[in-house]
């Protein structure tokens, strides 16, 4: 879960936590380890953060991480703007701070937004190159310009536009918390919260880039450092109240996070329901996240079924939705037994492909049409037996 949600975190008892995005808890990073092996194309990390007594969460919830922009990015932005960093500005709450602190902790200087280009252009209405990036008629051109760029690129391409550092608070969006699905059960880890983070790194337009929060967790949040966090309740992603109900979980990549929490919860509290996990990644040897724990759960019988799809381990790519199709008859039997079906991960492609596969499974299993399958799925949604945590 990557985008911030406004609602404040609630504990399991429904009490609003005293810690929020505007008043975070300074947590100690107790564990920050690499889950992927050498040679993997991905860098996925397991992060454990300490909690204070009274901070509670439920599997399915998220942890809000409040990152800082990396010092190199701040320095590059200051250079492009022609400022030193010791200039004084007022933040969003009218607190006086240095420009350097504002760029590091208050303002979003990462991924360039079209709105920022528009606000920047207002400061220099005579610059032709900026004019062609504004207005509804130039939306496509502006989006093309923003793709793979950050604020430093805008300030470099069109220098000298910002004459007063305070103007940046109108140009740039706030640096917002990032929400990550919790990958632990508090019944098993009383004083900590775990999450699973894919560190984003890439090159574009001649610069090295990284995700703001994932880069912070990957490079600057070593064990023993502190991280401002808060807990966020997600009441729309919950284990069944009936602890004997079967559960089917589709969690490729970091989508595994809430399902590790679900399985730990069912294990720690002795819930008798059957559990079936579909996990997918690129290569089994390098990318099988939580391998030992999941195989142990399967061996112990907690994980009734474990199906894996490693897309790059054979010539034809195999994904979780392909594994669902392979097991369609058994999957439909589980649905008929009242199984709850959960999906976590990429919203743009994976979640859609999984839903298409699920409709196909239902149509085949019930000897019905896709129209009938859509009605069946609609009924599952109404019963809260189809839940998604996608981003």
Image: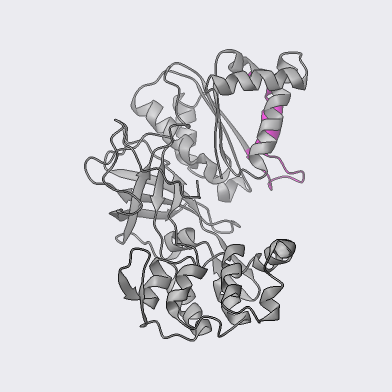
Q: Nearer the viewer, residue 6 or 241?
A: 6
Q: Nearer the viewer, residue 218 or 110?
A: 110
In which quarter of the view is residue 147 placed? bottom right
In which quarter of the view is residue 200 placed? bottom right
Q: Which image quarter is the C terminus in?
A: top right
In this view, 54 is above or below 340: below
Residue at left 53%, top 54%?
37
Colour theme? one colour
In this view, 265 is above or below 95: above
Residue 329 place in picture, x, y as percent: 69, 18
In which quarter of the view is residue 219 placed? bottom left
Residue 108 place in picture, x, y as percent: 48, 65
Q: Is residue 335 left or right of residue 174?
A: right
Residue extent of the magenta highlight: 309-330
Q: Nearer the viewer, residue 45 or 132?
A: 132
Residue 270 place in picture, x, y as percent: 36, 22
Q: Is residue 282 magenta?
A: no
Most distant residue in the left direction: 53
In this view, 196 is above or below 278: below
Q: Is residue 327 magenta?
A: yes
* Residue 203 shows in the view: yes
Residue at left 46%, top 37%?
258
Residue 95 place in picture, x, y as percent: 30, 68
Q: Is residue 245 left or right of residue 111?
A: left
* Residue 323 shows in the view: no
């Amino acid at each position: 879960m990557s985008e911030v949600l406004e609602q404040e975190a609630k504990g399991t008892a429904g009490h609003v936590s005293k810690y929020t995005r505007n008043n975070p808890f300074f947590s100690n990073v107790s564990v920050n380890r690499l889950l992927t092996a050498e040679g993997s194309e991905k860098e996925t990390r397991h992060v454990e953060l300490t909690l204070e007594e009274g901070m509670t969460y439920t599997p399915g919830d998220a942890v809000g991480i409040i990152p800082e922009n990396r010092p190199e990015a701040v320095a590059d932005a200051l250079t492009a703007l022609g400022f030193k960093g010791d200039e004084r500005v007022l933040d969003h709450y009218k607190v006086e701070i240095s420009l350097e602190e504002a760029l590091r902790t208050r303002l979003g200087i990462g991924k360039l937004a079209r709105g920022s280009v528009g606000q920047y252009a207002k400061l220099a209405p005579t610059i032709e190159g900026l004019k062609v990036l504004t207005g509804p008629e130039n939306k496509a051109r502006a989006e093309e310009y923003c793709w793979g760029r950050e604020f430093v690129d805008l300030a470099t391409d069109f220098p000298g536009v910002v004459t007063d550092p305070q103007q940046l608070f109108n140009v740039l969006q706030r640096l917002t918390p990032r929400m990550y699905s919790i990958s632990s059960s508090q019944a098993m880890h009383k004083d900590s919260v775990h999450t699973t983070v894919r560190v984003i790194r890439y090159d574009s337009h001649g610069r090295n880039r990284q995700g703001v929060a994932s880069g912070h967790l990957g490079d600057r949040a070593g064990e023993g450092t502190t991280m401002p966090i808060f807990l966020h309740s997600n009441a729309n992603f919950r284990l069944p109240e009936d602890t004997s109900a079967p559960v089917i979980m589709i969690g490729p990549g970091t989508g595994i996070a809430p399902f590790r929490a679900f399985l730990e919860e069912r294990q720690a509290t002795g819930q008798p329901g059957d559990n079936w996990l579909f996990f997918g990644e690129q290569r089994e040897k390098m990318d099988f996240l939580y391998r030992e724990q999941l195989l142990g759960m399967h061996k112990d019988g907690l994980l009734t079924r474990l199906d894996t799809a490693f897309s790059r381990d054979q010539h034809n790519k195999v994904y979780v939705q392909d594994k669902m199709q392979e097991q369609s008859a058994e999957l439909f039997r589980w649905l008929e037994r009242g199984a709850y079906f959960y999906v976590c991960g990429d919203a743009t492609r994976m979640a859609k492909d999984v839903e298409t596969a699920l409709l196909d499974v239902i149509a085949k299993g019930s000897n019905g049409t896709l129209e009938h399958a859509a009605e069946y799925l609609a009924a599952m949604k109404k019963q809260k037996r189809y839940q998604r945590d996608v981003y």
